[in-house]
Image (cartoon, rainbow, N blue to C red):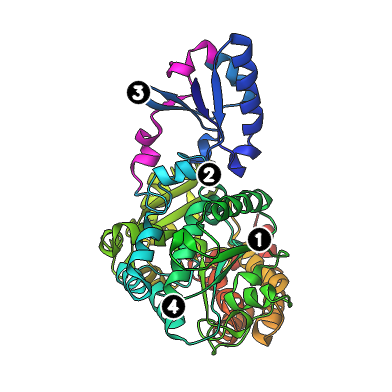
Amino acid sequence: MTRIFVPRDVVALALGANKVAAAILENAKARGADVTIVRNGSRGMFFLEPLIEVETPAGRIAYGPVSAQDVSSLFDAGFLNGGAHALRIGRPEEHPYLKRQTRLTFARCGITDPLSLDDYTAHEGWLGLKRAIEIGSAAIVEEITKSGLRGRGGAGFPTGIKWKTVADTKADRKYVVCNADEGDSGTFADRMVLEDDPFMLIEGMTISAIAVGASKGYIYCRSEYPHAVKAFNAALDLARAAGYLGKDILGSGHAFDIELRVGAGAYVCGEETALLESLEGGRGMVRAKPPLPAIHGLFQRPTVINNVLSFAAAPFILAHGAKAYADFGMGRSRGTMPLQLAGNIRYGGLFETAFGLTLGEIVEDIGGGTASGRPVRAVQCGGPLGAYFPPALFETPFDYEAFAAKDGLIGHGGIVVFDDTVDMMAMARFAMEFCAIESCGKCTPCRIGSTRGQEVIDKIFDGVDVDANISLLEDLCQTMKFGSLCALGGFAPYPVMSALRHYPEDFRPRTAAVAAE
């Protein structure tokens, strides 16, 4: 029997993967071929989806992007034996896009069946958890600290410090909370983990629970991810049945279970304290800090709250040791970062690599430049509230400190590319509009400042006292940046100020430009 791998990742589904799978079965039946379909995850090469793979004696051979209409010709070409075809990619790991990557977190994505415990175990699954049980709480925290792992949700806070704070705080109960409210534009790595390698996240959260002494975990997922919710809940059931969650994990005496909660679509709930408020059943409103969630978090108990990618890095670190992880990266940015290439880009998808590549290498070399073929004009990193970088800054290394030095953010690793047709004043206005819509309303700088920001940019667009209003906009941005209660209002000025700084010509009166023509 020949095994054929057809991704069930939502990107592949959106591009017709289910129809491809059905066409394969139909053609195989008609031709008397003995095949079985494995619904694997995506390798992250979205520009080739649906990417199907066939298991042959020479290894897995990939073809893509495949449509249902291509299936008959694939059978004619002998693709069950890796035959030549216009869509033949060859061995996927030899494809330049994959070959250049350093896959630690996403090592299994696209290779295994996401809901097969046997597949996960065969590919180093649970090794980190088993070692965590052996070495105990203090040693786990020390490994995470020495690895240099920092929060992958955007803030970049050292994970080991957070875990140690929770571990050292006395309480009758502690919690582990995973922030899967992936709302930044151009990001999809969290979703890929939930859909394509869910046991890794379960393992990472369980390692954290053992480290800090927590007995209950929650995953807060965005409502726009129904496929991820379904896949992860199925994985939770399988993990419980196999003893990886529950009252006595692997006979260790540690009790820990996880519950998935779905948010109602508020961007601000990606902020950790607003997320906790929502988990408790309240409105997603930002809390003032201190106290920190590590001391007074969910239900006022000590709480580890990390992003999906932070927890997902823990199994590798525990299985292979802190040094193996810390050997990758640069400066204070250790390990790898799953970059998510989106927007007007030729090769969109996930690219996991060690910190240190320049932005230009990522966009022009790995991403292949724009899909439109026009020159790149701007790149936004760090979501809708990230700064815009022009090609003049393409030598900037992708690193927390290097980006901060240029008034930018790497955030969750989303990279959105724009060509030379983009209107940067319109993009600056969008940042203020987005903030106004998504603000929880608790603090004045964010709630009122974002609305006033839209109004000021509209006046600039209309040519009303342009220089004075640009000065007013800059002053408003400073007020929001330093006066807002959380990062929503505090980061909204980043795209506005970067647009003003790098693209001043776009803030000239449009009426004058039209008149000049």
Q: Earlier in the sequence, mark 1 or mark 3?
A: 3
**Magenta residues?**
75-101
User: Mark 4 and mark 2: span between their CA atoms?
Assistant: 29 Å
Q: Residues within 10 Å of mark 4 (few under 14, many from 20)?
A: many
Measured in 3D between alpha carbons, the distance from the residue under mark 3 to the one under mark 2, in whole angstroms, is 23 Å
Task: Kindly report the distance in space between the C-alpha atoms of the residues bearing marks 1 and 3.
Answer: 41 Å
Query: Which of pointers 4 and 3 lies earlier in the amino acid sequence?
Result: 3
Q: Which disc is residue 114 wearing? A: 2
Pick whichever, 320 or 171, lies toward us. Answer: 171
| Residue underneath mark 3 | 58
Amino acid marked by disc 3: Ala
Mark 4 or 2, which is nearer the eye? 2
Give, as a three-letter code, the residue at label 2: Pro
Q: Residues within 10 Å of mark 1 (few under 14, many from 20)?
A: many
Identify the image quadrant of residue 422.
bottom right
Q: Residues within 10 Å of mark 3 (few under 14, many from 20)?
A: few
Which amino acid type is marked by label 1?
Arg
The image shows residue 398, relative to residue 214, as above or below, that is: above
Instruction: Of the two numbered discs 4 and 1 on the same chain, state the one appearing first in sequence.
Output: 4
- Mark number, residue 411: none
Q: Which residue is mark 1?
A: 222
- Is residue 31 shown left or right of residue 94? right
Q: Amino acid at mark 4?
A: Lys
Residue 36: image location, x then y, percent: 55, 25
Pointer 4: what residue? 162
Residue in front for this viewpoint, 317 or 247? 247
Q: Quadrant of the C terminus?
A: bottom right
